[in-house]
Amino acid sequence: MAGARLQCVTRGMGVGLLAAGALVTLSDPSRAAESAAKPVTFAKDVAPILQEKCEACHRKGSMAPMSLVTYEETRPWAKSIKERVVSRQMPPWHLDKTVGIQQFQNDRSLSDDQILTIERWVDSGAPLGDVRDMPPPKQWPDEQGWQLAKQFGPPDLVLKSEPYTMPAHGQDVWWKPLTEVPLTEPRWVRAVEIRPATPAGRRITHHVLARLLQEEPDAPVNPGRLNTGDDSNTGGANNAGLLMEWAVGKNYDIYRPNTGKLLLPGARIWWELHLHAVGEPIRDHAELAVYLYPKGETPKYRTYLTLFGATANTSARLDIPPNTVTETQAFHVLKAPARLENFQPHMHLRGKAMSIEAILPDGSTQMLSYVNNFNFNWMTNYIYADDAAPVLPKGTIVHVTAWHDNTAANRNNPDPEQWVGYGDRTVDEMAHAWVNVTYISEDDYKEWAAKHKPKRPAPAALQ
């Protein structure tokens, strides 16, 4: 199944877009021929794929519209499943696999072999096969329980916003209450998890922000601790920034070993619940589970959830005329060495693609990630694997580029005849990336760079 897609290419200090070819390409024809000779069944071949990559959403009581746990549940959807996986619409992983970092902690995408297996299963009539080949049912946590409890135990704090009743009909609402954080001493956070409190509440919630409001001292809490920032508007020495965001596809953050976020006495959570009407009145609130380091255990590094905009000013210079595809970009200077932990693009209905690139002090560039098929319905957070997270020197320029499609070719576009600018409403637009930034010292960076110095090829022998 062929189709057009975008491919990101680096041109010096810029990023361009090129048309490309087929959506799925198998690089080894002999491997494909060998695979085609084997019969494919649901019990032996397809069910394990669904358990690994699909059941997290596609099971009874979860967010997806159908369950794909049993053969009887899956068989009626066989042709639709094939269409969605071949076009790489499902599972929701909209990252270009040909450029940038490709190792992630939460990679839910299908491999070429897995896509081919599902395609062949559907084309052969979607047979069940021998039921004795079925894998044991996967055990999923209670939807009302905390997902991280299995790893960390019960949360140390559960913070709740004041409830809000969204009427059956009306304009979108941004509910912004305050919640006190009950601490009497500084504590370090190793993980956070956030959610609307009820399944009904998830129907009306577009996103939830949990901003951290606290008095940040001019000096670090612990002597010698680095507490610096960049030139964006949410990270820095005197700005605690955003603690966590919930959106479809993003439920929690786990900070890497020896890193975390700091909560101080007197801290408050300033919530932002973006709510929309769904035809019936629903009352709900947001909940935030906080998992703390043990008392007295202090991580070496502090992480900030930072907004890197794709415009020179977060709320300005976003001008999207009718029936056009536009490109915007912005640059952010790191004032200290840092590790970028993830990449989460944020746009609305006209969002098309976003890239994040590092321009190093020596002038060289590194394409970090490129989401070439952004989908507003899935605010996927791409969390870099431990060994793949980029570590960047002081003075690095973080270059963020965004593309918006305000044409009829965009299936999510409510009206291509309308001009679109920046705004909070879904029909308005935004263009920024949420990135957890962990700042490190110069000595730490030099040590890292020495261990990861590229090996130079041996000189060619003289003729």
Image (spheres, rainbow, N blue to C red):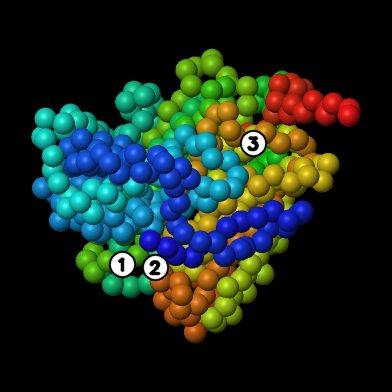
The residue singled out by tag 2 in the image is 172
Q: Residue furthest bottom?
A: 417
Q: CA distance from mark 2 to mark 1?
A: 7 Å
Is the residue under label 1 in contact with that under label 2 (CB below 8 Å)? yes
Please provide percent x and percent y for residue 16: 66, 61
Among all residues in the image, which is located at the extreme right?
462
Observer able to see residue 327 = yes
Q: Which mark is residue 390?
A: 3
Q: Earlier in the sequence, mark 3 or mark 1?
A: 1
Q: Quadrant of residue 450?
A: top right
Residue under numbered circle 1: 277
Q: Quadrant of the N terminus?
A: bottom left
Nearest to N terminus: mark 3 or mark 2:
2
Task: Please state which of residues 328 and 46 is positioned toward the viewer in this rendering.
Answer: 46
Foreground residue among 445 and 116: 116
Residue depicted at x 38% and y 43%: 32
Q: Is residue 186 visible?
A: no
Horizontally, residue 153 falls left or right of residue 254, namely: left
Q: Quadrant of residue 203?
A: bottom left
Is residue 237 or residue 43 the one in the foreground?
Answer: 43
Task: Please tell me whether residue 355 is drawn above or below residue 295 in the rendered image.
Answer: below
**Label 2: which secondary element:** loop
**How many angstroms separate mark 3 from mark 2 (CA)?**
38 Å
Instruction: Say what amino acid the circle numbered 3 marks.
Output: Pro
Q: Where residue 66 sits in the image (x, y, percent)? A: 20, 53
Could you tell me residue 412's position as x and y percent? 41, 70
Image height check: is 398 above or below 338?
Answer: below
Tag 3, which secondary structure?
A: loop
Q: Left of 307 or right of it: where is 34?
A: left
User: Which amino acid does the dot numbered 2 rest on?
Assistant: Asp
Q: Earlier in the sequence, mark 2 or mark 1?
A: 2
